[in-house]
Image: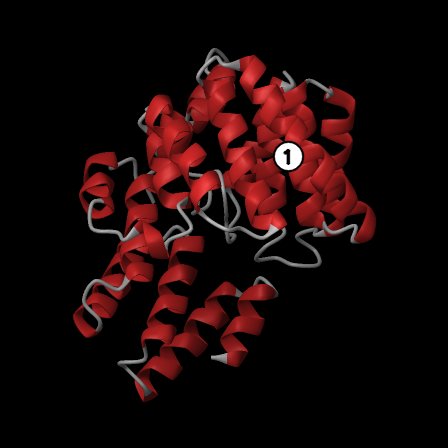
Amino acid sequence: MALALVARRQGNWDQGVAYFEQALALDPRNVELLFLLADTYGSLRQFPAAIKLYDRMLDITPNDQGAIEGKVCIYQAQGNLAEAAKLLSGINWQNSDGEVLSNQLRLERNYGEAIRSLQALLVQVDFTPQQKVDFQLDLALMQRLAGKTTGAKVTAEQVLSTVEQLYKDQPRAIFAAQLSLAYALVGEKDSALRLAERATVLRSRAKDAMGGPMFEGNLAVVQTLVGENSRAISTLTQLLQTSYWAWSYSLTPITPALLRLDPIWDPLRGDPTFQKLCEEKQP
């Protein structure tokens, strides 16, 4: 398992899968191993293989929340929102980070419910400052998509003071990415682009083949929010050809189905190049 984790972090995905399979041959009911291999197949966009492994987890530990959320993410990536919604009804949100629900509501364009649930979560749950920032940014983005631009700016401004200090103390990629999104939502284009690009340098795919590209995903979102459409399309084109571990806007790598469904990409829809990206490529 340890060798598998190292291999996939280096971008040696096939070797990582082989190590995980060897480990599972020795311990076939190890739920942690099943989850890690399913997560790996998700990063490779080998979704049917991932679903089978999540189902194996659920055979061993029925109602396993990690497996259910994993399947939800796969169905979202495939554009099957109806199947995702069925599974979501069985999740205990007290024990969940709420990200999969937020993504589902955004993909369904159910902004009102998304805003209400995020506002309630921010009041009810005792988050760390970093966790709170993630949900505040989710809320600001949802407000922006709903056309509530003033509310989005107010929410994003609340983030800035917190994250600016975090980034000053620890200049990490995650803080640079969070700052970039906050700046984009308050309309500070130059700062947003500078920090989004900085995040891709701090955690580049050369340093971290598994996690680095997700910061390129953040860059694409920021580029879209500030009107750099052609640059966003170029970033997305590269990401569609990349295996990686994802977070936040999509909990799997970008797929044509997610490009078609996600309102984040609405400003790009008139571009023929983007329209081609939304077409499913058969293997």
The percent coordinates of residue 39 (x first, y second) are 40, 60
- Identify the amino acid type marked 1: Leu
Hey, which quadrant is residue 58 in on the image? Answer: bottom left
At 34% from the left edge and 45% from the top edge, which residue is drawn?
A: 283
| Horizontal relation, residue 180 to residue 109: left or right | right
Is residue 95 visible to the viewer in this orientation of the structure? yes
Q: Which of 28/143 is in front?
A: 143
Hey, which quadrant is residue 281 in on the image? Answer: top left
Label 1 sits on residue: 219
Q: Which of 170/257 is in front?
A: 170
In this view, which residue lies farthest toward the right? Answer: 168
Classify mark 1: helix, strand or loop: helix
Q: Which of 44/90 is in front?
A: 90
Q: Is residue 241 above or below residue 230?
A: below
Q: Is residue 273 above or below residue 22?
A: above
Q: Which of 22/80 is in front?
A: 80
Q: Residues within 10 Å of mark 1 (few under 14, many from 20)?
A: many
The percent coordinates of residue 273 (x first, y second) are 51, 20
| Horizontal relation, residue 231 to residue 279: left or right | right
